[in-house]
Amino acid sequence: MPLAIDYADIEAAAHRLHGVAHRTPTFTSRTADDRTGAHLYFKCENLQRMGAFKFRGAYNALAQFSPAQRKKGAIAFSSGNHAQAIALAARLLGMPAAIVMPQDAPSMKIEATKGYGAEVILYDRYSQDREALGRQLAAERGMTLIPPYDHPHVMAGQGTAAKELIEQARALDPAHGALDVLVVCVGGGGLISGCAVAAKHLLPHCKVIGVEPEAGNDVQQSLRKGEIVHIDVPQTIADGAQTQHAGQLTFPVIRALVDDVVTVSDAQLVRTMRFFAERMKLVVEPTGCLAAAAVLEGVLGVRGKRVGVIVSGGNVDLRRYAELLLEGAQP
Ligand SMILES: *Cc1c(COP(=O)(O)O)cnc(C)c1O
């Protein structure tokens, strides 16, 4: 079975996104380099439109709708950032959008989704099956369901983040800018599968490492077992990675191209969030800290390496953000 996407799909996505998505900056940090003994390149998707890389995949998917699909619009089920991404992409492309969201999603994400003009339908994530609900609503309304990760157009769109990061790292250091390692957070695997396809095409020797929350290491388990493992909804502050299983399309790509998956704790995520705020002046949501935490907390040994780190998003309730930053801080 061929993989769901190849590098040509990512190049095509990059053309569709050109002038629509931000080419987000890639930042370096002396403090981070000193701490790890490595050269780190942080791809700041927290500065992407709507605050996360998800805009890339959503827009790449919706831009390929037929005229009939555009008329009825898009429907999505999402714990947050995918919702905002579909809502914004739909608005830019002039089509309706309906979003099925968990009742306990951060209120900022619910409000932002409504703010982009989408209809929001709430459900209970502990008792209702969102996929079944999404499919039923899609059938009733004739809308096209775009899942948050298990879709080739979504995966290809997300992969453009790694393509840009690799280009930007090279531009920052033309002599040595080829990355040795690319570190990417993992929820359902849309981001890492797209990024792995881009990285292994552009830099065949680059290792691709996934990072999951300790409490939700389903992809790590799946890789060890050789098949998709399902887990209960994990309890972690990384709400964008509370997925219960990898996708039918993303898992084969991960299995073929991702070298390893490691995990980090919530405490490590909080320390990394603080590092971004204090040292790099960046607001990063807990899920957005996964990849950086693995590197900065020493979970991954990267001494002497050139390391690309995807900072996946920056959408966090301000009250929650303040609480997490101050937790355990000296008065
Ligand atoms: C969705 C999301 C993830 C996980 O992405 P997958 O494609 O599901 O693996 C990570 N970080 C942020 C900020 C997200 O919104």
Image (cartoon, rainbow, N blue to C red):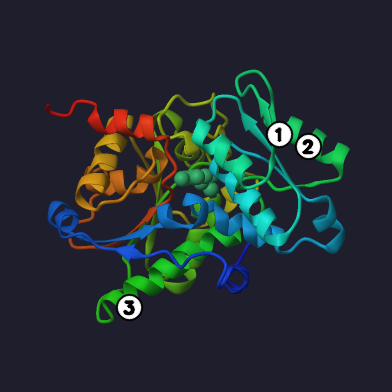
Residue 2 in sight from this viewpoint: no
| Labelled pair 2, 1 in contact (Cβ < 8 Å) | yes
- Residue located beneath label 1 in the image: 131
CA separation in Å, label 2 and label 1: 6 Å
Q: Mark number for residue 106? A: none
Tag count: 3
* Left or right of residue 188: residue 185: left
State the image coordinates of residue 24 (x, y, percent, origin top left): 42, 64
State the image coordinates of residue 90 (x, y, percent, origin top left): 69, 54
- Residue located beneath label 2 in the image: 135
Q: Residues within 10 Å of mark 3 (few under 14, many from 20)?
A: few
CA separation in Å, label 1 and label 3: 42 Å
CA separation in Å, label 3 and label 2: 44 Å
Name the element at disc 2: helix
Residue at position x 25%, y 81% from top? 175
The vertical placement of 292 against 93, above or below, is above
| Labelled pair 1, 3 in contact (Cβ < 8 Å) | no
Say which quadrant the C terminus sits in.
Answer: top left
Dot 2 amino acid type: Arg
Residue at position x 49%, y 40% from top? 219
Name the element at disc 1: helix
Specify which label sits upstream in the sequence, 1 or 3: 1
The vertical placement of 290 against 11, above or below, is above
State the image coordinates of residue 6 (x, y, percent, origin top left): 60, 67
Residue at position x 26%, y 49% from top? 295
Ligand 1 closer than 8 Å to label 2 CB: no
Name the element at disc 3: helix
- Residue located beneath label 3 in the image: 171
* Left or right of residue 66: residue 130: left
Residue at position x 21%, y 46% from top? 278
* Left or right of residue 132: residue 72: right
Dot 1 amino acid type: Glu
